Image (cartoon, rainbow, N blue to C red):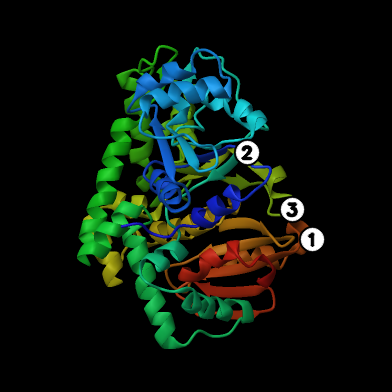
Amino acid sequence: MYFNRKIDSFLIEWKNKNDRFPLLVYGIRQCGKTESIRHFAESYFENFIEINFWTNPEFISDFNNSLDVNNLISNISLHFPNIDINPSNTLIFLDEIQDCPRAHLAFKNFVNDGRYFVIGSGSYLGITGYNIGDVTPIPTGYEEIYHMNTMDFEEFMWANGINEDQINILESYFIEKKIIPNNLNDFYNSLFTKYICIGGFPKAVSSYLLSNNMLDGIKVVQNNILNMKSDFGRRVDKNKQPLFKPHEVARIQNVFDLIPTFLSKENKRFITSKITSGRSNEKTDAIEYLNQAHIVYKVFNLENVSLPLLGNKIQSQFKLFPTDIGIVSSMYGIDTIIAINKGNLGQAKGAIYEAVVFDNLYKAGIDTFYFAKESGLEIDFVICYNGYSYLIEAKAKSGNTKSSKTVLNNPNHYGECKLLKIGNYNISENGSIITIPHYLTYVLGKYKEQV
C-alpha cells in the first residue's frame, strides 16, 4: 500500500527543472524514502536503476576509479544487462549512499554532464565521520537536498481517506479564526488520537489500516524501535568494518532508553550525567549520534525569549524528543497507548502531549526552543514566527499559563511576544493569545501569515 507523501510533488518539480541537480534525500530509517522514490520512478520513468550500497556492497567498486559519467554508466550497465540506460527516461537511484562516498562525490560529474536523473538517499548521511579514514570530499553546491520525515498529521489524514476539499474546509477555520463545529472537532480529535498512538511510520499506518486494529500498527513501531536499537552504532572504517565497540553501542542505547524517563519529569530536561558509563565527551557523542541519525532532536533552552532566538540558545541545556510521536508512545508501553486511546491518560499525559506538539512543529520545519528558569518560570516551546517570538503552551487539557502571562506582561524584559495555546481547545483569538486544537498544529508550516 503506497500513501501519498509531500515529497511526491517535490520530486515532480525536481524532474521538470531545466537546471536540475542530483537530489539527496535523507531522514530517519523507515520514514518512506525508498518507497517514495520507487513510486516516483514507476510513475514517471520507463527504466529504473536501483543500487543499494549497504545490501549490495559489490557496487562500491564501480566508483573506485574514474568518476567520468560515461565510465560510471558503463560499469553500472554491466549489473543491469536488460535495461537500456537511456538518459531521458531512466532514473538512477543510489540508496544508502553514505556507504559509498565516491558515489556521492560523483554528483559533481553528473551535474557537469547534465544528462541523467540521479537520486541518492540514506538514513545515516548526517553522522559526522560515518566512514572513518575516508577523506572523500562532499560535493557541496552540486546537489539538491530534501529532508524527509515520517508522516505528519496531514499525510496521516490523506492515508485515512480525508480528501483535499475536506482538509481545505478544516484549514479555513484556522485561517479565519472561526470556531470548528463540534461534530468536526470530535472527528478530528478522534483521528488525531490514533495518530498519537500509531505515529507516522508508513508501515505502521499501513498495518493499522489493513486490519483496522491499532495494535497491529503499534507492533510495527515497536519492531522499528528494536531494529533501530540493534542498528545503533552503524558506523564503519575505510575498509567497511564496524567501528563502534559493544560498550559504545550500549551507551547509545542507554541514551535512547532514558528519553521517556526525562520527558516524564516536570522540566523534561535531559541530564547527560545520568548516562550510565563513559567520559563526558563520550556521553555527548552518544547523544549526538542519535541526533545526527535523525532519531531524536535537541530542543535547547533559551536565556531569553526575545529575538533572535538562536542568539539566546543555551548549548548545555536541552530536551531530547524522538522525531516521531509513535516512538514516544511505544516507549511508554501498550498500557499507556490504550489509556491514550480511551482518553484516560495519567501522569504521562504531559510528556505525550508535549511530544506530539513537538512532532508537528518539527515536521513543519519550524526551529523549536523552550524557556525555563530556576525561578520556576517555564514555557513548553518558543518559536520565531512571522517576526514575533511565539510562546507555545502544549496541554493535554486546559492548563495554567501563569509563566506565559508573566512573559507577555513584561515586554521591556522579554520583548514583544505572542502566545499560542495548543491543547484540547477549539479555535479562539483574544489579543495576543490564540488557541488551537492539537490536530491543527501542522498548519503552522503552511499558513505562516495567518497566525
State the mark number for residue 412: 1
Q: CA distance from mark 2 to mark 1?
A: 48 Å
Amino acid, disc 1: Asn
Dot 1: element: helix
Compared to 81, does 87 lie above or below? below
Q: Position of residue 29 (x, y in %)?
A: 39, 41
Q: Which tag is nearer the camera, tag 1 or tag 3?
A: 3
Compared to 115, does 343 lie above or below? below
Compared to 66, does 206 lie above or below? below
Q: Which residue is mark 2?
A: 21
> In the rendered image, which quarter contains the C terminus?
bottom right
In the picture, measured across the screen, residue 103 lies left or right of residue 433, that is left
Mark 2 or mark 3, earlier in chain: 2
Mark 2 or mark 1, earlier in chain: 2
Q: Which residue is mark 3?
A: 307
Q: Which tag is nearer the camera, tag 2 or tag 1?
A: 2
Amino acid, disc 2: Phe
Within 10 Å of the Cα at label 2, are there few (<14), some (14-19), or many (20+) other Cα atoms?
Answer: many
In the picture, measured across the screen, residue 250 lies left or right of residue 177, that is left
Q: CA distance from mark 1 to mark 3?
A: 13 Å
Q: CA distance from mark 2 to mark 3?
A: 35 Å
Q: Residue at x 31, y 59 (%)?
A: 205
Q: In front here: 200 or 49?
A: 49
Q: Position of residue 54 (x, y in %)?
A: 36, 27
Dot 3: element: loop
Amino acid, disc 3: Leu
